[in-house]
Image (tube, rainbow, N blue to C red):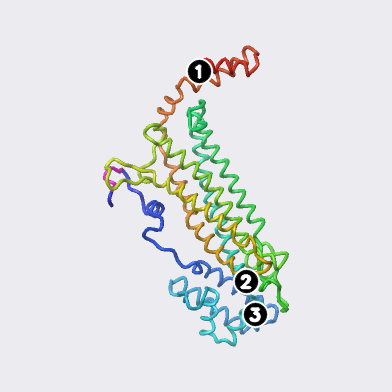
Amino acid sequence: MMWGGNFKQMPDQQVLDFTSGWDVKSKPAYDERLLPYDIKVNQVHSQMLAGQGIITETELVKILAGLEHIKQLHNQGKFKLVPGLEDVHTNVESYLVKKIGVRIAGKLHTARSRNDQVAADMQLYLKDQCLEYAVGLKRLIKALGVAQSTFKQAPAPGFTHHRLAVVSNLGLVFGAWKTSLQRDNQRFTHWMDLYDKCPLGGAAGYGTSFKISRQYTAKRLGFKAPYENILDPITNRGEPETALAFNVTIMMKHLSQIAQTLIIFSMPQFDYLRLPDQFCTGSSIMPHKKNPDVLEAIKAKTAVANGLLNSLMMINSSNLVGYNKDTQWTKYLIMDLVDETLPSLTIMTRLLSSIIVNKQQLEQACHADDLNVTLMMEKEVKRTGQPFRRVKQAMERRCK
């Protein structure tokens, strides 16, 4: 390392990965993340086809065996997507054709289009990510609740306009952060209420003449229900991604506010709190530096989330009803957004759980003369019964 000799505890790999971004690591192909979902969707779709008498039980057994083999290869890191086969869906079907023959594997796509297949894969992926954010938020909210309780009696200056304003307490600050994140958690719950639906059965967007059971596939895939309108999830592909991105971006705005406050409060000029060494990085030239890189990275990721959300909002904003290729790019945008933001919850939870509060410095900051003026003014209003405005003006003259 180019730094760290002055650190009591060095950052662990999770922290270093978080602060280094994508400098020395690469992302997997986007469709590699969809492979487990595509296998699941294919399994359920083929079971539905058999249940409806569209394929035979013998054909179903062979299709399921082939899909299970792909799943095992994937778990072993041995199933590689071939770029020449366009996407994960074609890769899976092509492998099945080689393994069990086109006369059976070729029936898997009956009563289905890639349009509803992709939408189903993505919907399952998005549900899992939504749950991941909810779990991470609950842990962070719990950590903030502990801090709120621990420091509810700890005097601390309150700020407005980046200036000292009144005497308050640190518990109030942690409590405000907790409350904002609780709202964020409610947004993720609401996302599930809106989008926990199965797109399968829409085919290219306008249905199929085969007698299928949309209720069966929805239930077996863990959705609450199929979409009410089969065209809706196809023509509005990207809407669930955008809605989730909006929730994440609001959440990141709150994390960014926490990060900036912690950065300022931990500056030597304030010294209200101290960041543990394991959440800082050093300098390649200055021996004394301990930089709040983790918190600065959260601020950067918030900006990235805003940009990705804006792109998601623009895609599919002016398309003709039905499927449009534009919406494929919503997959890349939402996956990038998840990559950038989801780890922030774990990092922030760990940091807040080990932060060091300098109570002595906080109490000293509360002794500044101006901080008690508002309280004195209110006491004077109560004591004399004079109009608030008159007492305030008198106090202002004394503050010149």
x, y percentage for residue 157? 48, 28
Which of the two discs, 2 and 3, labels the residue nearer the N terminus?
A: 3
Residue type pointed to by label 1: Cys
Q: Nearer the viewer, mark 3 or mark 1?
A: 1
Residue at image mark 1: 399
The kind of secondary structure element at disc 1 is loop
Residue located 65% across and 84% down the image? 56
Residue sitting farthest toward the top: 384
Range covered by the magenta-colored residues:
3-7
Residue at image mark 3: 110
Image disc number at residue 115:
2
Residue type pointed to by label 3: Thr
Q: How many marks?
A: 3
- Label 1 neighbour load within 10 Å: few <14, some 14-19, many 20+: few
Question: Is residue 125 located in the magenta-colored stretch of the structure?
Answer: no
Which of the two discs, 1 and 2, labels the residue nearer the N terminus?
A: 2
Report the predominant secondary structure element of the magenta stretch. loop
To which quarter of the image does residue 205 belong?
A: bottom right
Q: In the picture shown, does residue 73 fall above or below 361?
A: below
Q: In the picture shown, does residue 104 fall above or below 254?
A: below
Q: In the picture shown, does residue 85 fall above or below 168?
A: below
Residue located 34% across and 46% down the image? 281
Q: Spatial distance from mark 2 to mark 3, Cα to Cα? A: 13 Å
Residue located 55% across and 64% down the image? 331
Q: Nearer the viewer, mark 2 or mark 3?
A: 2
Residue located 51% across and 37% down the image? 174
